[in-house]
Image (spheres, rainbow, N blue to C red):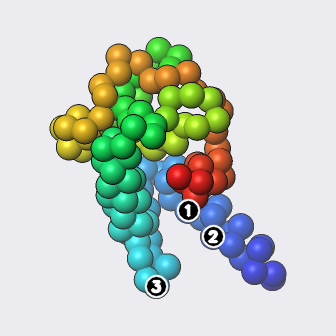
Amino acid sequence: MTQEDALNELQDDINRLRGKGLQVGTLNDGYHSFNELYAHRIANFIALAKKMAKSTFKPVWISDVQSDGTAVAEGWFLLGIGKRAGQQITYHIPSAEWDTCKAFADVLKKAPEYDGHTSADVLTRIAEL
């Protein structure tokens, strides 16, 4: 079995567990759990957005309504840097962080028109800040 086959099999197992309603956030790669990595990503993005909000470089915003008018998934909201197509950097952030972000971000009734950015786009855009 190749490494790729083994990883695909493991992913299938994880998907089956998630399908049964099991939380997989405690899965650990030997260094960090998924829960820990997400907590770091959330804290880092909030810190970056807070710093960006202090500059006039790009607008920082939050919304619990997506650009198409539908509500963001329960328990989450969008935190974004930049509103224009080709500049947006967004993440879903847990609702527990709303007040923290509201202290520095503009609250929008609806998120800016989504420009279709991917995870790869977000990484590129962050690197270009």
Looking at the rendered structure, the kind of residue marked 3 is Gly
Amino acid beneath label 2: Leu
Q: Mark 1 touching mark 3, by CB under 8 A?
A: no
Residue at figure coordinates x 63%, y 54% from the top left: 124
For residue 32, above or below residue 49? below
Which SS class for mark 3? loop
Count residues near mark 2 (Cα–Cα under 10 Å), then give few for <14, some for 14-19, many for 20+.
few
Whether residue 43 is visible here, answered yes or no, is yes
Left/right placement of residue 104 relative to residue 13 reads left
The tag earlier along the polypeptide, 1 or 3, is 1
Residue in the foreground of this view, choosing between 103 and 128: 128
**Which label's residue is closer to the chain start, 2 or 3?**
2
Quadrant occupied by the N terminus: bottom right
- SS state under label 2: helix
User: What residue would you read off at disc 3?
Assistant: 30
- Which of the 4 quarters of the picture holds residue 4? bottom right
Residue 27 horizontal/vertical position (percent): 44, 71
Q: Tell me: residue 30, above or below residue 8.
A: below
Residue at the spot 20% in from the left edge and 43% down from the top edge = 100
Marks 1 and 3: which is nearer the front?
Answer: 3
From the image, tell me which residue sits under label 1.
14
Position of residue 17 measured from the top left corner of the image (x, y, whole percent): 50, 58
User: Which residue is pictured at 55% across the width and 37% down the height?
Assistant: 88
Instruction: Tell me what residue is drawn at x 63 percent, y 70 percent.
Output: 10
The residue that mark 2 highlights is 10
Q: Residue 93 carries which label?
A: none
